[in-house]
Image (cartoon, rainbow, N blue to C red):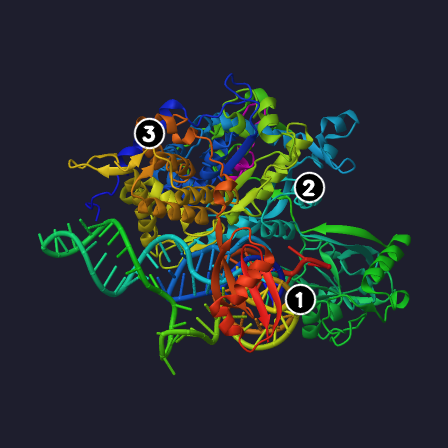
Amino acid sequence: MSERRKQFPFHDFEPRWQAYWEKHGTFRTPNPEDPDFDPERPKYYVLDMFPYPSGAGLHVGHPEGYTATDIMARYRRMNGFNVLHPMGWDAFGLPAEQHAIKTGEHPRINTEQNINNFRRQLKRLGFSYDWEREINTTDPTYVRWTQWIFLQLYHSYYDTEARQARPVAELEAKGWSREQIDAVRLAYVDEVPVNWSPDLGTVLANEEVEEWRSKGHTVERRPLKQWMLRITAYADRLINELEGLDWPEGIKLHQRNWIGRSEGAEADFTIGEEKVTVFTTRPDTLFGATYMVLSPEHPLVDRITTAERRQAVEAYRTKVGSRSDLERTELNKEKTGEQTGAVAINPMTGGEIPVWIADYVLMSYGTGAIMAVPAHDERDLEFATKFELPVIQVVEPPAGEDWRGFTGEGTAINSGLLDGLPTAEAKARATQWLEERELGRKTINFKLRDWLFSRQRYWGEPFPIEWDASGRHRAIPEEELPLLAPELDDYKPSGSPEPLLSKAIDWVDRGDGVRRETNTMPQWAGSCWYYLRYCDAANPGAPISTEAERYWMGGDGDGGVDLYVGGTEHAVLHLLYARFWHKVLYDLGHLSKPEPFQRLVNQGLIMGEDGQKMSKSRGNVVNPDDVVDEYGADALRLYEMFMGPLEQVKPWSMKGVEGVYRFLARVWRVVMEEQKDGSFRLAAKIDASDPSKDLLRCLHQTIEKVTSDTEKMSFNTAISQMMVYTNALTQEQRVPAAAIVPFLALLSPYAPHMAEELYQVIREKFPAEAPATLASDLDWPVHDPAMLVEDEIELVVQVNGKVRDRIRVARDLEKEAIEQAAVTSPKVAAHLEGLTIRKVIVVPGRLINVVAN
RNA sequence: GCCGACGUGGCGGAAUUGGUAGACGCGACGGAUUCAAAAUCCGUUUUCCUCGGAAGUGUGGGUUCGAGUCCCACCGUCGGUACCA
C-alpha cells in the first residue's frame, strides 16, 4: 500500500514549506509594542482549546477544530487583519502523575516528551500558529502568574452592593477583623464533604468522579478541609452576561441550567423553640404542606428528634451517611425516610405537620429542609403515597387536568387568603404576607456550588500560601513567585487524604512553626487564563501587558477572543471557570472587557469508521500521522473539513480521504505535468491568455461561494465549489494563469502547502500574475458581480406546482413576455389543454408556476 | 423522566431560508487507455414502470399557487442530565 506511487510530491513540498514558514517567521504576529506592528489593521483573535499532551499523541479529533481555526486565521490574514492564532499545552494533569508513580520518574520528563510529540505532529499539519507565543501551563514562568491570579482572588471579596470584586484591603481599612475578612474572601478554606479517591490520592470535582470511577478507581465521600473559590458570588452575572455572547444556544442553556437560578421564598416554620427555614419556589402552596422533611445531615435533627424515634432516626442517618453516591442513585427509585416525632407549625396556617428526615432532601441546596406539598410535587407525592401521608389540593389546574401531582400554574384553592388567585399572583401575595410578618422573605437560590479548588496531587500548581504558627493562612509575597513543588523520591499516594507534598518535610517546614500549604491546584487553573497569556506570552513582569490586553482583548467591539473552537465536553467546566476568573480580573481592573470568549463554535465528534466512538479497545482509532504519511497534510486537513458541517458528529472514512486526495491530485495536474524522469514542471497548457467568458464566470462564482462559505465556516460546501471549479479547469485545453492564481488564493487556507507550491511555479513563469511572494500573502480575491450575469437564463415552468418544462429567456425579459413564453411552450401547453388558467406566478430569475383547473 | 440536537439515495452530505430535491464526494456499473493491473480519463447511477410519465426528504394531518424547509400530533436515533424543593 505505502509502496504505491504518490500522485503528487507532497512528501517533498509539505515539509519544505513548513521549514520555509518557520525560517521566515511567516506567521509571527507583532504586538502593539513591536516596531513592525501595523495599528491600521483590525484585529482577529482565533483560538483553539489547547490540548492536554497525552502519551497517546494526536487524535484525528484535534486537527478537526485546529484546521477550522487555521482556515479562519489564514482567511482573515489575507483580508488584512492582524491575526492572533496561538497554540500551547494544558500540561498539568493526573495521567503524567500516574506515569510518574509507575516509573518513579519526575512527571516533567514525561510531559516534555509528550509535548515534543504533539508539537511535531501539529507542525507537520502546517498550521499557521505563531509558535513564538507557545505556552505551557507547567512552565515556572507560567505557574508564577497562575499563582499570582490565585492571590488576586485570595486578596479579594465580593461586594454585593457594587456587585463586583474588590480588594479585602478596603475591609481592613474599615476595621474588619481577620476572621470577618477570611469569611468573605473569594478564595477561602472550608470543611466540606468531598469526593475522595484513596487510590488516586486526591479529591475530585463532582464532574470528574464518573470518569475516574469508570476506569476502576474508588471514590468515596468524606468531609475534608479544602480551598474553595467563591464562584457562587458570580452566579447571577454568569447567567446574565451570557446573553450577548455568540455561542450555540445549547451551550448557553447548559450553563444556565448548571448555575440553576430559581426564584422563590423562604418560610420560617417552628418546631418547639427552634426555627426551621425552608426554601420553596411555590410559596402559593403553603396551605398544601402536609409534612416537613429535613435532610438527614440537617444540624437540627438531633435536637428535635423525640426519644422514642431517636433509635430509628440514628439508624437511618448512619445508613444514609455510609452510602456512596452510586448507591444513592441506584436506590433513588424508592423513597426512604424516618419520622422524627417532632411537629412543625406552618407560619401561614398555624397548622401542625409531622417532621420527617429523608435523603431525597439535600443538605447542600436551599436550607436543607423543605415543606412537602404532595399534591403538587412529584417527589413529595411519591413519598406521601409510600408513607400514607395526607395529600391536599391547593392548586386548581386549567380545565381537564388531574390535580394530583399537578406542578404547573393554575388557580389557588383551599388556601384562605390566596383563594382564587392565579399562581403568579398567589406566589407574590404569599411572599408579601410572610415578609410583612417577618416569617419569610423572597429568595433566589442557585444550584451552582462554590468551586472545590484543591487537590492532593503532586503535578499541579502549589498554593502560594503558608500557615503561621497560630494556624492562620497567609499569602506568600508576590516576589517569591513562582513557588515550585520540590522533587520527591516517589510519587505514590499514601492512601490518606494527606497531600503528597506533605512528604517533602524540608519544603513544608519554614521554621518558627510556619508551614507551607501542601495542596495543589486543579488542572483547570492553567486553562482559566491561558488565552490571556498568549497575548503577551513572554512577559516577565506581568501576566499580560496593558497594551497587549487592550489591543487583543479589548477594542471598540465586545472584545475578547473573536472565535473560540473546541468540543462540547467543556460546556460547563472550563468555559464557566474561565468566565469566572475573567470577571474577577475585570472587576479588579486588570482587563478591559467582562467576557473572554465572544464567539464559540463546537466541533462535532469524529467517530470511527464503524460509526462507534473511537477507542483503543474497539480498534477503530485513526492516527493522523499515518494519514499524513499516506496522503499528506493537505489531504488530511481538507478531508476533515469536507466530511460535513463542523458542528456535526460524523464517521471517519478512509475512502473519503482518498476522494479529497484525488481532488488535490487533479489540482496538481491542472498546473503541473510529469516529465520522463518522474519530476514535475509547469504544464505546457498554462499560458498568459485571457480566460474564456464561461471559465471566468465559473471562477467568480467560485470566489463568491468560497468567500461566503468560509465566512460562515461552511467549509464542506466551500471545498465542493473548489472541486466544481477544478473540474471546469480540467476540461480546458489551454489554462490561463490568470484563472489559476485567484483559485490558489482561495485554496491556500484549506490546502496551504499545495497552494504555496503551485503558486511558486506559476510565479516564476508568469510574474505579472503574481502580486505576492507567497500564496499565503496574496490578497483574498473579490468577485466581480458583473462576471456572474448571464445573457440568457433558464427558468423552470411548473403547472400546478409540477415541473413541466425549462425555457431559456433573455435575462431582462419582462414579466408579461415570460408568462407568454411559458404558457406557449409545447410541453406546458399540452398539460394546460382543457384547463383554464387561473393565475400565473413568476419568481424572477427562477420559475413560473401556472395555476389552472 | 426532563433538556438539547437530529431524521434527505447503497454511504458522507447539498439545497441561495417557502421556489428545479439529491450539488460535491464515496461506492457501484459500463467504456477508453494498458500485455495486464494500478493510476488516469469519459459516461451512467433516488425508486418504479408500458420511456411518456408516476411516486419520493421518519409517519400522519394542516397552511400555501408551491413545503425537505412553516404549523400540529406521533415514531425513531444520538448527546447531556439525574430527587436542586
- Give the structural element (helix, strand or loop) at label 1: loop
Whether the magenta-drawn stretch holds residue A826 is answered as: no
Foreground residue among A260 and A246? A246
Label 2 is placed on what type of residue? Answer: Tyr
Residue A136 in picture, x, y percent from top left: 46, 31
The residue pinned by badge 2 equals A234
- Give the structural element (helix, strand or loop) at label 2: helix
The residue pinned by badge 1 equals A337
Q: Quarter-wise, where is residue A313 in the image?
A: bottom right
**Dot 3 alpha-carbon crowd within 10 angstroms: few under 14, some 14 to 19, many 20 or more:** some
Foreground residue among A733 and A284? A733
The residue pinned by badge 3 equals A760
Label 1 is placed on what type of residue? Answer: Gly
- Give the structural element (helix, strand or loop) at label 3: helix
Q: Is residue A546 left or right of residue A729?
A: right
Report the magenta residues as a range. Answer: A509-530
Q: Quarter-wise, where is residue A381 in the image?
A: bottom right
**Answer yes or no: do the residues labelled 2 and 1 have beta carbons within 8 Å?**
no
